[in-house]
Amino acid sequence: MHFFIGNKEERLAKRLQGGEKDALKDFYSLYAEYLTAVCARYVTDEEDLKDVFQDALVQILSHIREFNYRGAGSLQAWVSRIAVNQSLKYLKERHQNELARLSWDVPDEEENDDPPINDIPPEVLQEMIRQLPTGYRTVFNLYVFENKSHQEIAQILGISTNTSCSQFSRAKNLLVKKITAYNNSKQQPR
């Protein structure tokens, strides 16, 4: 089955590179929801999210000829990277002051134990992440979802490695509080 997905993805990429009009419609139906979700991890305002998504699509279509198929999942990884980069570009442009404040050395909170998350619906957990302050959310997403190191995050955002580590720790602690509150609300009898 993985082979079929890879072949389908490769054919779609070639059709897009060849300028087929139907390929654009197929691409949109396959990737629009996914790309919106990727952008939504970073951009919480709905109108801005639409703009970032559209900018990502423009970048993808403008650079599709540069894409080299490298096996199943490579197109998705490539478009995901573009969506993340467009989201980060938006954050840098619109939230420059907030990202600059990340370098303030505020003492870390005490780390909490990780609460159970297995019973939390993914959409609820995603909303909790979206509610994090922009700086926390950005570092958290880059570390958890994009598998970036704190050194890479620091370079991407123009902050120190220690700041990236502390922002991740604060994001995690805030999520622990939100998850604990959610779990406690579900355990109370009604």
Image: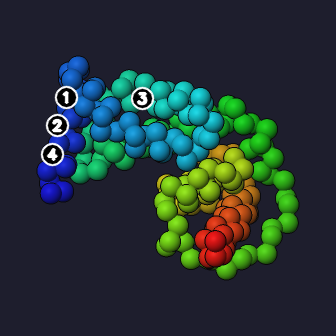
Rendered residue at 47%/27% (across/down): 54
Mark number, residue 36:
none
Q: CA distance from mark 1 to mark 2?
A: 6 Å
For this orientation, the residue located farthest to the front is 190
Pointer 1 and pointer 4: residues touching (CB < 8 Å)? no
Q: Amino acid at mark 4?
A: Asn
Could you tell me which secondary element the residue under label 1 belongs to? helix
Mark number, residue 7:
4
Could you classify mark 3 by the number of other residues whose Cα lies within 10 Å: few (under 14), some (14-19), or many (20 or more)? many
* Residue 94 % position (x, y): 70, 32
Pointer 2 and pointer 3: residues touching (CB < 8 Å)? no
Pointer 4 and pointer 3: residues touching (CB < 8 Å)? no
* Residue 68 % position (x, y): 27, 39
Q: Amino acid at mark 2?
A: Arg
Could you classify mark 2 by the number of other residues whose Cα lies within 10 Å: few (under 14), some (14-19), or many (20 or more)? some
Could you tell me which secondary element the residue under label 3 belongs to? helix
Q: CA distance from mark 1 to mark 4?
A: 12 Å
Could you tell me which secondary element the residue under label 2 belongs to? helix
Q: Amino acid at mark 3?
A: Leu
Q: Which residue is mark 3?
A: 57
Could you classify mark 1 by the number of other residues whose Cα lies within 10 Å: few (under 14), some (14-19), or many (20 or more)? some
Q: Which residue is mark 2?
A: 11
User: Would residue 31 be seen by someone viewing this image from the given angle?
Assistant: yes
Q: Earlier in the sequence, mark 4 or mark 3?
A: 4
Q: Quadrant of the N terminus?
A: bottom left
Q: CA distance from mark 2 to mark 3?
A: 19 Å
How many discs appear? 4
User: Would residue 161 be seen by someone viewing this image from the given angle?
Assistant: no
Pointer 1 and pointer 2: residues touching (CB < 8 Å)? yes
